[in-house]
Image: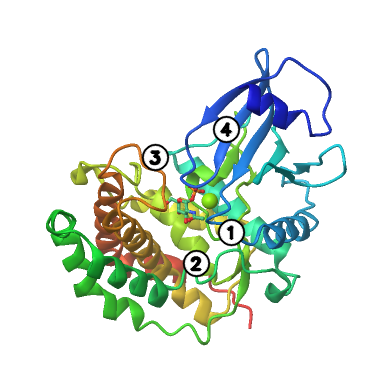
Amino acid sequence: MEKLRKILSYFDIPKGAYQFEFISNGLINDTFLVKEGCESNYILQKINTSVFKNVNGLVKNIAIILSQLDHTAYEKVHLINTKTGKPILNWENEIWRLMNYIPDSHVYNTTNDVQIAFETGKILGLFHNLVKGLHPQELEITIQNFHNLTYRYAQFLEAYENASDTHLQEAYHEIDFVKNNISTLLSIDFDKIPLRICHNDTKLNNVLFSIDKKALCLIDLDTLMPGFFLYDFGDAIRTLVNPVTEDERDLSLIMFDKMMFSSFLKGLKKSGLKFTQTERESLHFGAILMPFLHGIRALTDYLEKNKYYKVAYANQNLDRCKSLFRFAELAVENTNFMKEEIQNRFEILEN
Ligand code: GN1
Ligand code: MG
């Protein structure tokens, strides 16, 4: 607490009797809600610099994107400068930042509410509409090969080679799942899909909502980078269309909720975002690729004894992998449904 108070004192905010509440949603950075009495005022965050090695690039990207997000229907979370006018604080080799807290805003970790799905589609489309004027190459790469399956597979193979026998036995089925499915997933041709600026972590709990269930904005802008829309599409689908969390252990609870999928599409359509034909044809694949890719990443980290993600218990990464792979299977089963829905709703294309 004393340390947090000290860190906060470097930022350019009014003096106050602030208190700190740890927010446990993120798996990478350390996040705290800064409150004064019952009022929530700020979000204080320590950036994990072993994951985000290019902090200057990350800060630059966020500044570029925030300058594009001016719209009456988009509420921005911005960075609050330090007293010396810097957007981040470098304190004893730690990097900290402070952001405004939008009053009464909150996130959903899971939902089966179709309005939330609609709103998520709408805000994601608005975000993409607002940033599409920028050239993707204007952004720096904050994590190399972040959604590159070839790279993630290579990381997995290395972890597999070096894993303990116990880990290999425990993860036997999941390793098999990777081996059986990897070639199909790697065969997808990205060449004709347009590169866009993507958020690259559009899971449901990175969408901020008001109390009357209106989506306000996307949060967690650390992975803003060039990418394909199917990435953002897939991350939103895997967390919206499945009513349980990504580490759910009861696999029978994992579902592909078609109503939620359609509501998300309706919201996306409402945003007016347009796709090229190849892009439109790639979207359903995002809903398969992203849970698979996150599953491989979780499995790799399990085999490496949890070096990357924060875990609450030793097998949590394996549980995440099982549940993500189960959703990927369900997405495959729903391929035709997804394709038809996407085609029926998005007939107007850009070239
Ligand atoms: C990590 O820390 P958090 O929750 O924002 C990860 C994402 C995953 C997510 C959950 C930089 O994000 O890719 O979707 O966990 N971010 C990074 O699976 O690895
Ligand atoms: Mg994130």
Task: Say whether mark 2 is within 8 Å of ligand 1.
Answer: yes
Instruction: Please name whichever residue, 174 or 1, is drawn nearer the observer in this view of the structure.
Output: 1
- How far is mark 2 from mark 1, CA to CA? 8 Å
Q: Which residue is mark 2?
A: 146
Q: Amino acid at mark 1?
A: Thr
Which residue is denoted by mark 1 in the rendering?
A: 223
**Local crowd size for mark 3, using a 10 Å CA cut-off: few (<14), some (14–19), many (≥20):** some
The quadrant in which residue 325 appears is bottom left
> Is residue 215 among what the camera can see?
no
Of the image marks 2 and 4, the number of the one nearer the N terminus: 4
Indicate which disc, 2 or 3, sits on the residue closer to the N terminus: 3
Image coordinates for residue 326, horizontal then vertical, percent? 24, 56
Q: Specify the amino acid type for callout 2.
A: Phe
Q: Identify the residue shown where x is 47% and y is 34%.
A: 24
Q: Earlier in the sequence, mark 4 or mark 3?
A: 4
Q: Which residue is mark 4?
A: 106
Q: Residue at x 25, y 62 (%)?
A: 329
N-terminal-most mark, 1 or 4 = 4
Is label 4 within 8 A of ligand 1 (CB to nearest ligand atom)? no
Q: Quadrant of the N terminus?
A: top right
What SS does tag 1 mark?
loop
Query: Which tag is nearer the camera, tag 3 or tag 1?
Result: 1
Q: Which numbered tag is attached to residue 112? A: 3
Q: Is 181 on the left or on the right of 23, as rendered? A: left
Corner quadrant of residue 225: bottom right
**Residue beneath the point at 61% across and 23% down:** 20
For residue 348, side relative to residue 305 (left or right): right
Cβ–Cβ under 8 Å for marks 2 and 1: yes
* Between marks 2 and 4 in the image, the one whose residue lies nearer the viewer: 2
CB-based contact (under 8 Å), mark 3 and mark 1: no
Report how far apart the C-alphas of labels 3 and 1 lie in the structure.
27 Å
Label 4 sits on a secondary structure element that is loop
